Image (cartoon, rainbow, N blue to C red):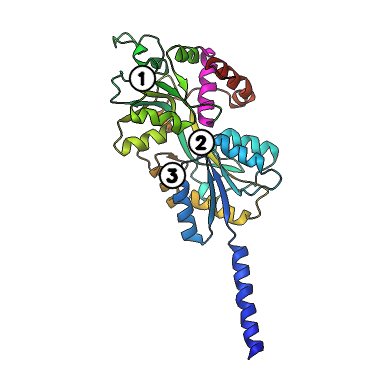
């Protein structure tokens, strides 16, 4: 009897150990919205039984954490707010090559052999509709320049009322900054500074004073945050300038030091499933999959600025140094 009991006990313990190995937690670092990763984590765990450990922060903080953990990395899946992260990590050989079957309907420009977009945001002007300022239609409308002739107004009405997300903290803000600087140097940013615009921290830090009415507009706001606030009844709108803007695909990738690569692949599969992509759309991001509907403007609705990504990121230090110089940084 004792021998039998020991045998049963050993079997239960062994099964438990095997289950823990088969379902080790997946660790995801993400620069996306907290509410989105919470939904994806809950849905993934419910479907697979695999728990998800999450670190959510700005792009800069996520990258800093990965660097700090270089000697003992723990992240399995990384979701960045900048496609350059995927390009950079691929060059370093840090990716696991994986093509999810659910990526079949993701357009080719939103995936590689080792990275795939979770969703896409675009950059625009977030404008408080009750600010008493004229509705902007172009980036330059927030400077001290005059409006176009049909609107007998000048944007001096935006004096000291414009926030700019810090391009050193926000990958999407950096890309817009670099793309616009490629059009006419940094004249636009000098004009913004002359009209009292300030660098106001990461995306949420720049937007909150506009939502609260202390500021009138964000130059280069990440659209999904503004659209989500508008959907909740906030006095806010997002304008995509007709002269052009940038999009920010949010690449998801499995890191090659992951000890849970099979489960990490399952997470990517879930993220790109019907349920996962609906969660992306519900957060007002553009879904990566072309067959998933979204109640917001899509890439085809926008005019995109033309620029060379490699050149833009090759001059990252110089661009950030120039912005720091203009806005009084050291």
Give the class, few, some or many, for how many residues have Cα within 10 Å of label 1's Cα (few <14, many ≥20).
some
> What residue is disc 2 on?
249
Q: Is residue 90 left or right of residue 197?
A: right
The quadrant in which residue 43 appears is bottom left
Residue bounds of the magenta highlight: 170-187
Q: Main secondary structure of the magenta part?
A: helix
* Residue extending farthest bottom: 1
**Spatial separation of the CA atoms under disc 3 and disc 2:** 12 Å
Disc 3 element: helix
**Spatial separation of the CA atoms under disc 3 and disc 1:** 27 Å
Residue 119, x across and y down, in percent: 47, 40
> What residue is disc 3 on?
280
Q: Is residue 3 left or right of residue 327?
A: right
- The disc placed on residue 137 is 1
Magenta stretch: includes residue 186: yes
Residue 77, x across and y down, in percent: 58, 47
What residue do we see at 61% from left, 56% from top?
262
Q: Earlier in the sequence, mark 3 or mark 1?
A: 1
**Depth check, front residue: 140 or 65:** 65
Can residue 297 be seen in this snapshot?
no
Residue 99, x across and y down, in percent: 58, 48
């Amino acid at each position: 009897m004792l021998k039998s009991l020991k045998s049963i006990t050993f079997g239960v313990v062994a099964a438990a150990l095997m289950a823990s190995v088969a379902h080790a937690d997946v660790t995801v670092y993400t620069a996306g919205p907290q509410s989105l990763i919470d939904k994806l984590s809950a849905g993934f765990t419910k479907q697979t039984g695999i728990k998800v450990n999450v670190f959510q922060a700005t792009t800069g903080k996520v990258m800093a954490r990965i660097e700090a953990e270089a000697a003992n990395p723990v992240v399995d899946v990384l979701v960045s707010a900048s496609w350059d992260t995927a390009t950079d990590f691929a060059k370093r050989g840090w990716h696991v090559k994986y093509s999810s079957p659910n990526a079949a309907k993701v357009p080719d420009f939103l995936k590689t052999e080792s990275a795939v977009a979770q969703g896409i945001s675009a950059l625009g002007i977030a404008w408080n509709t009750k600010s008493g300022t004229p509705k902007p239609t172009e980036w330059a409308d927030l400077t001290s320049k005059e409006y176009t002739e049909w609107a007998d107004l000048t944007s001096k009405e935006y004096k000291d009322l414009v926030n700019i997300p810090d391009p050193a903290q926000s990958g999407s803000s950096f890309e817009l900054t670099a793309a616009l600087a490629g059009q006419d140097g940094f004249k636009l940013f000098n004009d913004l500074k002359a009209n009292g615009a300030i660098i106001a921290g990461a995306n949420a830090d720049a937007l909150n004073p506009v939502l609260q009415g202390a500021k009138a507009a964000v130059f280069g706001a990440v659209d999904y945050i503004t659209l989500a606030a508008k959907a909740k009844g906030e006095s806010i709108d997002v304008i995509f300038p007709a002269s052009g803007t940038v999009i920010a695909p949010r690449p998801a990738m499995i890191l090659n030091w992951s000890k849970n690569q099979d489960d990490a692949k399952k997470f990517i599969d879930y993220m790109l499933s019907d349920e996962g992509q609906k969660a992306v759309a519900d957060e007002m991001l553009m879904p990566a999959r072309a067959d998933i509907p979204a109640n917001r403007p899509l890439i085809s609705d926008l005019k995109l600025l033309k620029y060379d990504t490699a050149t833009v990121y090759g001059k990252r230090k110089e661009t950030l140094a120039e912005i720091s110089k203009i806005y009084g940084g050291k």
